[in-house]
Amino acid sequence: MISKAGDVVRYLHKEDEYTRYMGNGAESDFINDDDIRKRLKANREPKPHNVRPIIEKSLAIETLQPDETAALLNVKEKELWKEIFEAAGSIKKKVYDNRIVTFAPLYCSNLCVNNCLYCAFRSENNLEKRRRLSLDEVKKETEVLAKLGHKRLIVVYGEHPLSDVNYIADTIRTVYGVKVKTGRGFGEIRRVNVNAAPMSVEDLKILKEVGIGTFQTFQETYHHETYKKVHPEGTTKSDYQWRLYCMHRAMEAGVDDVGIGALFGLYDWKFEVMGLLYHARELEEHFGVGPHTISFPRLEFAANTPFIQETRYKVSDEDFKKLVAVIRLSVPYTGMILTAREPADTRREVLPLGVTQTDASTRIGIGAYSDRYDRQEAERQQFLLGDTRSLDEVIRELVEMGHIVSFCTAGYRCGRTGRCIMDMLKCGKEGHLCKLNAILTFKEWLDDFAGDETREIGEEILKKEIEEVKTQQPSAHPELMKFYRRVENGERDLYF
Ligand code: SAM
Ligand code: SF4
């Protein structure tokens, strides 16, 4: 019987689409708050000689056990943290080499029926100017991003009947349809990832058909009680389990690149890292593949949103570095996303701790890429950004740090997704192809979009990468060079 608002939400959410994954007669989900607390307590004083074998296990690209992650989270010795930070960098290098992927978010709508206490899009925020982009506006926004050379977008939406799956699918088709002429080639978006509210299997199948890359939804907080507090009862987001099992439904719908995340600052950061680990392990256990990416946004200032000042759980810069490194060690194969919420100097420090993706030239106002942009507008967006540097500036810095920026989108276009890509990454096989594709796509970007200074240092790193292929994959070198010449001569979108 439906007797209160929470029941209506559960009814609307097709309860059987998550209870079927739950044990204990659907009484409990896979996040056991008491168990997490107990493990954190039991491992509160790990000895260095117990921690080092855990680091070794991560370096062998094995997902950690909860007790192992709990031990890492509680390390006290500075020296040992140094070893953890170094291991985080080595794991990233082992699985992804020196590649880094860039993308831009495209906010399509800030209409929202929810009332999440931390977000400026929440329904009770009367100061927020509400807007949903028309498809023509989506096209204009995409054209701006494609002209900068972006090849990957993440489209973002509030939760609202006017931004349901049909609107989402229409916007994605519009993005894929954009092609802009550049000096020598053309700009286009080749992978659209989605950040949206949890959906039913039926709706997720629609996104699969449109050809999305990763489907991303953050649990925000894994702590049940806090979740309840920050997502008021009766709102659709108040249903913790509908959200928690969203990635199970995505897998069922055939969307097997899924992105999980926690919003750090709502509850104890150590608890949230444990939650992410349990989530990854649960997906591995059920589907043989864990998350394609993990995100770890920190709570940022949002206009007219007093909760942000009130939370007791703000994460310091020092703890932020620790949590990023422990996520890297806990789920060694996964992609890790650092966003422009963080200011440039934090990004520089955190990037070497295992990050694989980052956004650039980011704007999160609705229509902000093609509109005039000023500070006042900026303060009315979902939250305040820490880094608004251009794609060219960010890429220049990444190259200076020794990275090659990959615009490769071959993986999902060749069916290398989900378990297939994860298995290949773990054994280093995908890495070989990725290296070749990174060279080709970065060359394409440098020729079409880079400023003079970036092109100059970009060409240097390309030379180094090509030399590495020559020594490490000699049989692939001649074929690579054939493709490379074709890109030099103006051919575009070549990949292995
Ligand atoms: N409305 C959908 C949802 O809630 O899942 C789509 C995503 S929402 C626009 C994108 C993400 O922004 C949220 O999942 C949340 O983690 C993050 N977010 C919300 N408020 C934030 C804040 N004040 N600072 C940093 N991130 C925030
Ligand atoms: Fe809406 Fe998402 Fe913001 Fe919550 S986090 S208010 S669901 S846009």
Image (tube, rainbow, N blue to C red):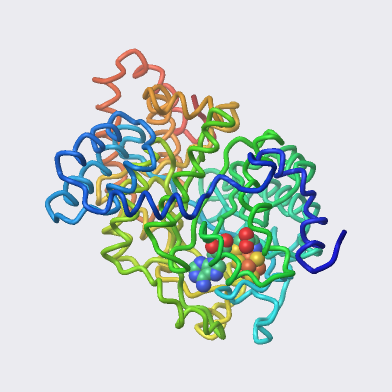
Q: Where is residue 426 in the image (x, y as percent from the top left)?
A: 39, 27
Instruction: Give the farthest residue toward the top.
Output: 475
- The residue lying at 68 percent from left, 52 percent from top is 242
Q: Where is residue 56 in the image (x, y as percent from the top left)?
A: 23, 33
Instruction: Give the farthest residue toward the right.
Output: 1
- Do we see residue 353 in this rendering? yes
Of the pair 132 and 262, the residue shown nearer to us? 262
- Do we see residue 453 in this rendering? no
User: Left or right: 345 with respect to 5?
Assistant: left
Q: Where is residue 32 in the image (x, y as percent from the top left)?
A: 51, 50
- The residue lying at 53 percent from left, 67 percent from top is 226
Q: Quadrant of residue 320?
A: bottom left
Quarter holding ligand 1: bottom right
Of the pair 113 and 273, the residue shown nearer to us? 273
Check the image and report above or below for 200 versus 391: above
Q: Where is residue 385 in the image (x, y as percent from the top left)?
A: 46, 71
Check the image and report above or below for 124 versus 278: below
Of the pair 158 and 450, the residue shown nearer to us? 158
User: Left or right: 127 with respect to 92?
Assistant: right
- The residue lying at 32 percent from left, 39 percent from top is 92
